[in-house]
Image (tube, grey):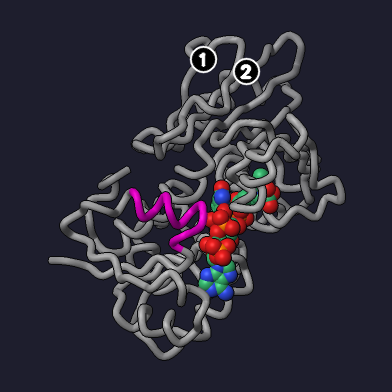
Amino acid sequence: MTHSVFIDGEAGTTGLQIRDRLLGRDDIRLVQLDPAMRKDPQARADCFAQADVAILCLPDAAAREAVTLTADMDVRLIDASTAHRIDPDWVFGFPELAPEMRERIAAARLVSNPGCYSTGAIAIVAPLVAAGLIDETEALSINAVSGYTGGGKAMVADFEAGTAPVHFIYGLDQRHKHIPEIMTHGGLLLQPVFAPSVGNFAQGMAVQLPLQLDDDRSVAALHQALADHYANEAFVQVVPADQIGARIDPTALNGSNVLRISVHGDDETGCATIVAVLDNLGKGASGAAVQNMNIMLGLPEGTSL
Ligand SMILES: NC(=O)C1=CN([C@@H]2O[C@H](COP(=O)(O)OP(=O)(O)OC[C@H]3O[C@@H](n4cnc5c(N)ncnc54)[C@H](OP(=O)(O)O)[C@@H]3O)[C@@H](O)[C@H]2O)C=CC1
Ligand SMILES: CC(=O)N[C@@H](CCC(=O)OP(=O)(O)O)C(=O)O
């Protein structure tokens, strides 16, 4: 059986990567839109009407417009934008988050794809809150570095023109668009301090959660809780710190859909850092969207990932 899929925003950073993953699959037919008409609502509506699943790789406003355009259609949506990630009418597309998630994604008409930083942060925080190792009101800081493709076409152009700094820190107003989804799906009641940054490399990401340790919250206990949560997962791996080495490379998982978590620190000092490494365009965007699409269509989850 062939399923029809429309990538709205196919010419963008996320859309192109999804197209690359789906081209050549004999179970998927890509619905084609004349590039000159890519922002024409009627032309997009005609494509939505032909699709079983549409993947929105658009700015938030255009993603919201797509929802309006498809209101009376059967097409199922996966939204890669920030627009619907805490909307209760949408299922959060993070299959590894909890045991019921795959079933919910498979049955959903509307699935929101997690943000890239959020994927790393939620992957660490949610299982530790569930295990009682982080309190929902604990004061947390989350630091992160992203490759510049995380900022879409405009940021790619800035770095490729040599006009961007080699590394910059931003989001200092503590209003980064990923904070609400990190709190909602991570299970936090107190807003964490979030410190994202961008480096002069195209792709890849590391998200860090520093934590103070105590008798119950040891390095081993943190590792074990995360390892137990992701024990049967192919795309989220919990790796002992001694297998990682002293330097963590944010680009280590580029080209894959894998997110790797490791717990570093020393019980004697009472300090630890939990690190998630992922490809911002893999498990952080396009890979996750294809994984969700496979689940929604009842196809093997890891196909083309
Ligand atoms: N890059 C990343 O790592 C991640 C991105 N995302 C999210 O995915 C979405 C897409 O991001 P990204 O691919 O980086 O962005 P890009 O800027 O690279 O691409 C966006 C695409 O959408 C097109 N577009 C803009 N407005 C409209 C419209 N009204 N109708 C149809 N098409 C339109 C743009 O057209 P034009 O070619 O004219 O610019 C462009 O091709 C965003 O919401 C982003 O936040 C999510 C996770 C990670
Ligand atoms: C480096 C960079 O600029 N990153 C983007 C987030 C990328 C992303 O994940 O966007 P979504 O929220 O749509 O998922 C930012 O901080 O706004």
Percent coordinates x, y for residue 2 in the rendering? 17, 66
Q: Amino acid at mark 2?
A: His
Q: Is residue 230 above or below residue 214?
A: below
Quarter holding the N terminus is bottom left
User: Which residue appears farthest toward the bottom when viewing the image?
Assistant: 72
* Secondary structure category for the residue under label 2: strand
Q: Is residue 186 visible?
A: no
Image quarter for residue 221? top right
Percent coordinates x, y for residue 17 in the rendering? 42, 49
Comparing marks 2 and 1, which lies closer to the viewer? 1
* Secondary structure category for the residue under label 1: loop
User: Which residue appears farthest toward the left when viewing the image?
Assistant: 1
Image quarter for residue 202? top right
Q: Amino acid at mark 1?
A: Ile
Residue 299 shows which numbered tag?
none
Circles 2 and 1: CB distance less than 8 Å? yes
* Nearer the observer, 144 or 222: 144
Q: Badge 1: few (under 14), some or many (20 or more) residues near its Cα, within 10 Å?
A: some
Q: Which residues are magenta?
A: 10-20
Q: Main secondary structure of the magenta part?
A: helix
Quarter holding the C terminus is top left
User: Which residue appears farthest toward the right when viewing the image?
Assistant: 173
Q: Is residue 269 visible?
A: yes
The residue wearing badge 2 is 264
Whether residue 106 sits left or right of residue 282 in the image: it is left
The residue wearing badge 1 is 244
Q: Is residue 17 magenta?
A: yes
Residue depicted at 46% across the width and 29% down the height: 253
* Nearer the observer, 81 or 93: 81
Percent coordinates x, y for residue 64 in the rendering? 58, 76
Could you give the CA–CA distance between mark 2 and mark 1, rounded to whole angstroms?
A: 10 Å
